[in-house]
Amino acid sequence: MKSKFSKIERRALSYLFLPFGIGGMAIATRFPELRDQLGINNGTFGTLLSLGGIGSLLGFILVGNWVHSYGVKPIVTFGSTGLFASLALFPHMHNAYYFLLLNIFASFCWTSFHIANNAQAIHRQEEVGELILPKLHGLWSLGALVTSLVAIVITPFVTLCWHIGVTVFVMWLFTMYGIVKSTPFFIDKNEEADAFPSFSIKEIAKTFHFQPVIILAMVLAMQVEFSIQDWSAIYAKDTLKMSASASIYGYTVFIGAMIIIRFNAKRLAAIWSERQLISALPILGGVGFAVCISLGTWLSHVNQILGFIVSLIGFALAGFGSSILAPTFFAISFRTSSLPSSVVVARIGLTQVIATFFVKVAISWVAQATSVTIALLIPALMLLATTKFSYLGKVTKD
């Protein structure tokens, strides 16, 4: 057993989470351009993004078993390489059907990267007994913040192809460096053989009975993050009539708020219990986001800048409110299960991706039939509902 979480290991893991955020989220900052390039409306674009869930579904079925059979290293290598290569091709897509196929493959690779990274982090967190997952998720968020800030600056001057191509290539190089440095600490193949279930249709079916309450809570908590990734730039450009560069501000503010909380998770855990945090944060995020984007949309007809500022406050509150819910529910799930970390991540993800698909499609067509503002109220209310699951958290402070 590797008994100590050293500075070297911390640094090595950071090279897996930080470039993932930078490279993985670069394309989201320019979704309005990609949508226009494909020549499709909001409903169709959102549906095509949601159908990437087919790749995620396959990933959550297969990759947990692969981590067990082959270890973390080959899965991280495959997932990161496939993901960054796919993202580099996105700006060259002008056909919706080719985009869909590429998105499915990219989502499969994203899920592979995600499962391997989180399985490694959760495994070591429980093995060492130190709260590390929120900070690693914070590094991912920091990467997303960096990529959005870069996009704000370069979008008026750099084409979509150059922006995404150069970004993902550089981040792939950093990830390969991180894999080399992390190799001594990776979960080996068959390391948790006693706990890993056999791969069969029967075992896949068991997934849908695995911790359903925790999974429901996580689905509710995470929709606001997915929705802001997909729709914040489109909301600012189409509803608030902001420029392509300014349209990225909403996601930037959201991610910045998430980072503040995630990097201070230990301090918060020393002041408030899990139960208190799960109870309070969704109220802050859900109510604040719903009120501010509604008010911001209305104000934009009177004063565009004022409406934009109020909306940004809403994105910030959503970031604060959703920031540590996912890593907290992951930790609760792993703590209450005898299964290894790769299986926990995969089983949660499999059910979650199915539920998220239907939510994303619903949001897409509500946006098309009504407005993006009304569509964004759906994840805001889902986040608010997460507070009902506070009883899952520990009552003691860490």
Image (cartoon, rainbow, N blue to C red):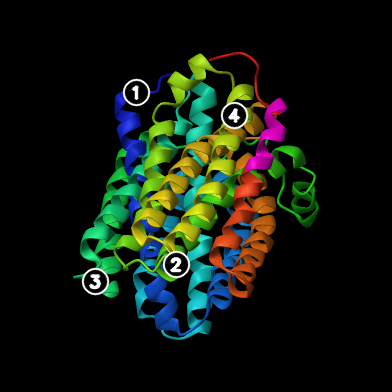
Report the residue marked by disc 4. 280
User: Does label 4 or label 1 sit earlier along the sequence?
Assistant: 1
Report the residue marked by disc 2. 234
Q: Kindly state the secondary structure of the residue where label 2 is placed.
A: helix
Q: Residue at x 63, y 36 (%)?
A: 193
Residue 57 placement: quadrant:
bottom right
Q: Residue furthest front?
A: 302
Magenta segment boundaries in residue numbering: 384-391
* CA gap, disc 3 and disc 1: 38 Å
Depth check, front residue: 65 or 93: 93
Q: Kindly state the secondary structure of the residue where label 1 is placed.
A: loop
Residue 2 shows in this picture: no
Is 184 included in the stretch rendered in magenta?
Answer: no
* CA gap, disc 1 and disc 2: 42 Å
Does residue 26 appear to the left or right of 116 in the view shown?
Answer: left
User: Does label 3 or label 1 sit earlier along the sequence?
Assistant: 1
Q: Which mark is residue 308?
A: none
Report the residue marked by disc 1. 6
Q: Kindly state the secondary structure of the residue where label 4 is placed.
A: helix
Image x and y of residue 37, in percent: 39, 82
* Vertical arrangement, residue 149 with respect to residue 395, above or below: below
Image x and y of residue 278, in percent: 61, 30
Query: Would you say the magenta stretch is mainly helix, strand or loop?
Result: helix
Q: Residues within 10 Å of mark 2 (few under 14, many from 20)?
A: many
Q: Residues within 10 Å of mark 4 (few under 14, many from 20)?
A: some
* CA gap, disc 3 and disc 4: 42 Å
Depth check, front residue: 395 or 295: 295
- The amino acid type of the residue labelled 3 equals Trp
Image x and y of residue 17, in percent: 38, 44
Q: Kindly state the secondary structure of the residue where label 3 is placed.
A: helix
Give the mark toward the camera: 3 or 4.
Answer: 4
Q: Which mark is residue 162?
A: 3
